[in-house]
Image: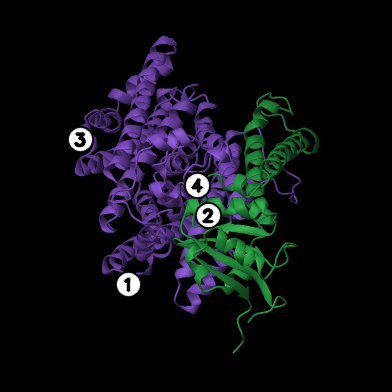
Chain colours: A purple, B green
Amino acid sequence: MSSIHQHEQQWIEGQPTFGGLTDQVSALVENKTPRGWYIALAVSSSLTVVLLALIGYLVTRGIGVWGNNIPVAWAWDIVNFVFWIGIGHAGTLISAILFLLRQQWRTSINRFAEAMTIFAVICALIFPSIHVGRIWFIYWLFPLPNQMSMWPNFRSPLLWDVFAVSTYFTVSLLFWYVGLVPDLATMRDRARTRLKKITLGILALGWRGGNRQWQHYEMAYLLLAGLSTPLVLSVHSVVSTDFATSVIPGWHTTIFPPYFVAGAIFSGFAMVTTLAIIVRQVFSLQNIITVRHLENMCKIMLVTGLMVGYAYGVEFFIAWYSGNIYERFTFLNRAFGPYAWAYWIMISCNVLVPQLFWFKKLRTSIPVMFIAALLINVGMWFERFVIIVSSLSRDFLPGAWGYYKPSWVDVGIFAGSFGLFFTLFLLFIRFLPIIAMSEVKGILPQAHAAVDPSAGEHHTRRS
Amino acid sequence: MTDLNHTEGILARYAGPTELLTAARRVAEAGYRKFDCHSPFPIHGMDEAMRLKRSPLGFMVGIAAFAGAGLAILLQGWASAIDYPLIISGKPFFSYQAFMPVTFGLAVLLGAFTAVFGMLALNRLPRFNHAVFHSERFSQVTRDAFFISIESSDLLFDMEKTPALLRETGALEVELLSEPPQD
């Protein structure tokens, strides 16, 4: 390990001290609440109220208030579900996979990326839950003994989804909380008022920062990263089996699991980049979230964008190569049929836009990457729309074809889910440290004890 | 002056990670067992310096993950093949291939719970009272301070020799830890 440390790059600019870094990050929570925060919260919480009101309307009136029809029985609700759950994936990739790969730059962005994951999964979980229609029977999804002596069908991908997504949410929450404990202890030790001392004291669990604690703590963190890595790859794979195990043309393909996972990471990094740019600008965190951090994220978007583009190409090729007329029709219909506009939005945003990131000048330009990330978010929403709606609206018999248009309730609930997401995110940045202080301190150059040759080989430690 | 009966331990502050690591090695060599090295972040090589055994958490999580997988197979097999057998698209009742996603999910879930709650149990957390919290200075540990604490229940603890050892190893400040007087 020591040889790696000699060559490692410095990710934090301005050579802050441990104390200076603590002050900088803690000040964001301890300072007087800026007026802009209240304005943003007013907007986002109003949208959340819209979400709750429209869910109430949906539950009392029924699924008919949506634009869903036969044949398009899955529409915006499932599009939004896949969209939000995909966004969550970047947070887990940053917290788990980049940790296992010892990518030190993750420490500047992992805290709010993990928060983003949790809030995105909350938004995602709303949609299938309200889509079941009779939401008061939603407990039927779980294997609970009941008076009907019935069990859920474990051979159905829809049930796998229930387990995959709820496990994902739980594990992400645990991971996030474990990461927060040392920073909550920092907040506790800085707290002035009695209320804060008690609240933060309880949340920090009495953390003492002793190495006997760090030892188990780091092992737990490593194990959680090891468990989350296959989990995050499996969640979107399982989501994709909701489609791939059916016989609908355009869905029934083996490419779906890796294609969905790549798309999820792609869209998630677009969202992390969007949030990171806003957060570093608003809170002057340019020394912690540097342009190099953002550039790395752009590179990941470029790679995953190429994978997604490749998947689009392969799908077309297999549709032709399979000789299946329905498959072939579906893909021609996607590109040239009634939903061609959505298809070409998807191609432009997901395949063309990330090509900008080949150029160093463009992937280090904040305005360019901000707009590109927003466009990728749009494109990835349209990808799910194209997959779901275009396949269902024209499947086998022309007599059974239809056309789908969203209703105002669809639009309102989707907008409302953004309100919920940003409300949670605003509360997070106001009350919790948005940078993982203990982790960033650990990658500062002065954090490494001078290597003593008599001490022998050191264990690799968390970075 | 505080006497041994009221002293719960001793706290020494060090300048930085390197000093803490060197001192930790000396304290461990001197034979102390009930001591800890407090730092704002984990320090490379500290486990060896303190002569700590490897954390058993990995084994605990491994066992929990296998238990989760086993439970998931039992649950799905019993529900689908014994208690409520239904023919669904001609698949066998015990379709172990189709049971894998849920099996994997429950293995990860139990593993993750064990990782977190096992870590807390091994660390004896939550614990809100501890000798080190008697020190005013100790609140700096989550900011930029480095400490060694030795509990008075350690067999080697001595009111003369222990502070002397800590000073010798480069402690900047040495402080006895005792319950603050009640007002």
Q: Are marks 2 and 3 on the same chain?
A: no
**CB contact under 8 Å: marks 3 and 4:** no
> Which disc, if any, is residue A32?
1
Residue on which the image places disc 2: B20
Residue on which the image places disc 4: A131
User: How many residues crowd mark 1 within 10 Å: few (<14), some (14–19), many (20+)?
Assistant: few
Residue on which the image places disc 3: A362
- From the viewer's perspective, tell me whether residue A295 is left or right of residue A143: left
Between A343 and A270, the residue placed more toward the observer is A270
> Label 2 marks which chain's residue?
B
Mark sitting earlier along the chain (3/4): 4
Between B97 and A219, the residue placed more toward the observer is A219
**CB contact under 8 Å: marks 2 and 3:** no
User: How many residues crowd mark 3 within 10 Å: few (<14), some (14–19), many (20+)?
Assistant: some
> Looking at the image, is A337 positioned above or below residue A35?
above
| Spatial separation of the CA atoms under disc 3 and disc 4 | 41 Å
Q: Position of residue A258 (x, y in %)?
A: 47, 27
Say which amino acid is labelled 3: Leu
Q: Position of residue A325 (x, y in %)?
A: 42, 14
Q: Nearer the viewer, mark 2 or mark 4?
A: 2
Q: Nearer the viewer, mark 3 or mark 4?
A: 3
> Looking at the image, is B12 positioned above or below residue B71?
below
| Spatial separation of the CA atoms under disc 4 and disc 1 | 42 Å
Mark sitting earlier along the chain (3/1): 1
